[in-house]
Image (cartoon, grey):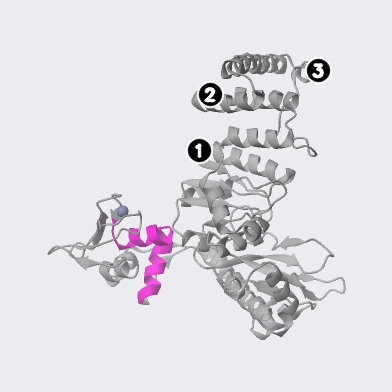
Amino acid sequence: MGRISRESIDQVIAANDIVDVVSSYVDLDKKSSHNLFGLCPFHTEKTPSFSVTPLKQIYYCFGCHKGGNVISFIQEIEHLNFPEAIHFLAKRVGIEIEEDEDERWQHKREEQKLIYHALLEAAGFFHRSLIGDTGEAARSYLTRRGTTLSDWRKFGLGYAPNQWDALYQYLTSRAVSDAAMLKAGLITRSSRDNWIDFFRDRVIFPIIDLSGNVLGFGGRALQDQGAKYINTMETAVFHKGSYLFGLPQALKARSDQLIIVEGYMDVIALSKAGFDNVVAPLGTALTLQQARLVQRHSKEALLLFDSDNAGESAAMRTFEIFSDIGMKAGFVLLPKGRDPDDYIRDKGPERMASLLDNPYDRSSYRLTLAERKSRDPESGSLRLLEYQDVALDILAEEENVVLAELYSDQVARKLGTSTERITQEVDRRRGRQRADKKSQVTAAVSGTATDMLAMRRPKFRA
Ligand SMILES: [Zn+2]
């Protein structure tokens, strides 16, 4: 987007009466001669403290102290940046926005427009293919996974037919150029040197941004050959490390928490069970950029990953990313071997809700996993020697002394010993961890690799 002229901004503000705009989100009552009141859309409340002053064209909440003009209201409620909010309001009243931009920027924007258009047409084609005659196998797959037409609509799911160039032919008939299709990542060159569709015989998950643009697609194979999931390759509009599947739908839930799951189908399963505040990265581990996106839209991330070794270490890495950017995160732990989708189907939404209400912090998560791993698979009894060693290391690494004491108490009971004993041993290990760190630094400075190796002790990795 280019720079929007001052005149256009003023024009947009003048054309969008704040009472009209706010009224489509909040029921307003006239309470005093100058103000209208309603329930605040930005915090939870039972009595109205959200006010709108038509004379000044401003809003203010006496509860959460949010306030501003019609543009900041739209920014806040639609999760848009300033230029996006201007465009949103301009569209609402049918105003053309004047933007001054240099030629190169203009060219890039034109190209983006063509790509977005191609992607939108493709999304429509995929969706109709799912609903129509060609989509039977895809529909039966999605039905087996417990989803229905309304879920497919909500997420705009689709099907890429089992043909070489069904999409290519369709887009050509819609006057979309080969160049636009290629730049959108929708087609590729075949070995016979003609254009073929990138996605074939796959269930399609569109990746949509907060302005409603389709950016790219994820595709799940219906047959057992080839990669199970593929995504649109990096294009001018699609960067798989910087967006999240399900975000536009998730933000409608207006929750302070965002649930992070591993896959597209997990998002749909949770949403179907009534947990709408759920997103997934696009086929990779969560990136720093995606973590920042989560941070921008919520106060706490709940990590709900598959309960297997891969899921557990992915959850731990993801937790560290959130911790690095100072964002609160908690672990939601499923029974061994479960994924979110099958857990909900087996146990129901209430049980999932209670797991989500009681997330684990870092140490309690690691302790619980340590206990699981130290249980004899046959008898179910705890292998005490194995457990105590790992548990004590975890306690020694806990920086919060209150938590360390709380968990020491729990570990003591499991081991049938006293909290004092545990605390003593934890202190000893803390001293050792500090000494380890020190000698690692010394070794690194003196630069001898063998010293470094000698210092390393096997450490618990979740
Ligand atoms: Zn408020």
Q: Quadrant of residue 363?
A: top right
Q: Is mark 1 within 8 Å of ligand 1?
A: no
Q: What kind of residue is marked 1? A: Gly
The residue at which mark 2 appears reads as 405
Who comes first in sequence, dot 2 or dot 1?
Answer: 1
Q: Nearer the viewer, mark 1 or mark 3?
A: 1
Report the Cα–Cα distance between label 2 and label 3.
36 Å
Residue 242, disc: none
Q: Position of residue 100 (x, y in %)?
A: 42, 64
Q: Residue at x 64, y 47 (%)?
A: 334
Q: Eyeballing the image, is 28 above or below 263?
A: below
Who comes first in sequence, dot 2 or dot 3?
Answer: 2
- Are dots 1 and 3 in contact, CB under 8 Å? no
Residue 364 is left or right of residue 194, and the answer is left
Crowding at dot 1, Cα within 10 Å, few <14 / some 14-19 / many 20+, comes out as few
Nearest the eye: 287 or 432: 432
The residue at which mark 1 appears reads as 326
Residue 450, disc: 3
Residue at the outermost left position: 33
Residue 349 sits inside the magenta stretch? no
- Are dots 2 and 3 in contact, CB under 8 Å? no
Secondary structure character of the magenta stretch overall: helix
Q: What kind of residue is marked 3? A: Thr
Report the Cα–Cα distance between label 1 and label 3.
36 Å
Quarter of the C terminus within the rendering: top right
Q: Is mark 3 within 8 Å of ligand 1?
A: no
Q: Quadrant of residue 435?
A: top right
Residue 1 is left or right of residue 317, and the answer is left
Q: Position of residue 352 (x, y in %)?
A: 57, 53
Q: What kind of residue is marked 2? A: Glu
